[in-house]
Amino acid sequence: MQFLCTLNSLPHVSFMNFFSPKGQWSQFRRQNGEYILYYLMEGAMYLREGDQEYALKAGDVFLLQPGLIHEGTKAAECAYYFVHFSNICVLPFETEGSPFDRQNPFRGFEKGGEVVRDMEYCLIPKLLHIHSEKARAQIAECFDEAIEKAKSGARNYRVFWGCKFLEILMLIAENGADAALEAGNSQLPLRTMRRIEELIAFLNEHYMEKITGKQLEDMLGMNFDYLNRTFRKLTGRTIFQYLARVRINRAKELLVTTDMKLAEIALETGFSDEFYLSRQFKKHTGISPALYSKGRIEK
């Protein structure tokens, strides 16, 4: 199970701390009105939430839902960070299909018929094991900085808590995406995956340039048809459909944040001229660039 979280507002963190009980310990029975995130550093934790039981180990991140009764089922030695939070939209997010459909850092996820790939949203697994030692240290460091801010008596420490918790959520989402990608690509050659990663980075960096299939084939040393089929399997789009989306998203940003003329935006985003940009923009968004720039329809 996963949760779709919005990151465009600061979460309200009511409590955040590190807990290391002496000896064996078990969670008491309660029904909380907020979300609770656990990050287990040492030992084990045995929980029941509703009708489902969980056995957590060191490196696990676990999200408890509000309104459900949870309690410990067995005592064990443990040490963990925890945070109680609210004020951000957290919705169950389940889709059928392959791991690429469920969660993929290349593809993103569907929202209103459009693939969302920005950092206003992230997917948080209910239970995730963090394998990377570097990621574990980064998450722990965010918790430590937030907790220390409160201990120091800082006046606005709760705001700092909210900021640090957003960092934690993004780190968890990134590691969850990596885990889903690794699980779904166990049969793909490592060389192919590396080439796909290089291709994604290239398209996002050089979208304003003229890009051809022959150019990509020569650059990556792979047959373009094979590359395109694999890319579509991973992202749900062909290479040039993905490139068009990158260009349109950049055009959106320029339309609402600058006073550039459409011809200038076309040049900046890799379209041959303003007329082609206008046609492609309307094809992808359903409205003209002029209407979008006026902010009459939120995309």
Image: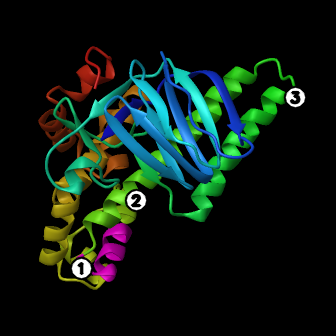
Q: Which mark is residue 217?
A: 1
- Disc 1 secondary structure class: helix
Compared to residue 100, the image places residue 277 above or below, namely above
Q: Residue at x 32, y 73 (%)?
A: 193
**Observer-nearest of 102 and 196:** 102
Residue under label 2: 178
Q: Quadrant of residue 203?
A: bottom left
Residue 113: image location, x then y, percent: 16, 33
Q: Which residues are magenta?
A: 187-199
Within-10-Å neighbours for mark 1: few <14, some 14–19, many 20+: some
Q: Is residue 184 rendered magenta in the image? A: no
Which is more foreground, mark 2 or mark 1? 2
Residue on which disc 3 sits? 152
Q: Nearer the viewer, mark 3 or mark 1?
A: 3
Disc 2 versus disc 1: distance between alpha carbons? 26 Å
- Left or right of 220? Residue 159 is right
Q: Which residue is at 23% across, 76% downward? A: 187
Name which of mark 3 and mark 1 comes first in the sequence.
3
Q: Position of residue 244 (x, y in %)?
A: 22, 50
Number of other residues with Cα within 10 Å of mark 2, as a class: few under 14, some 14 to 19, many 20 or more: some
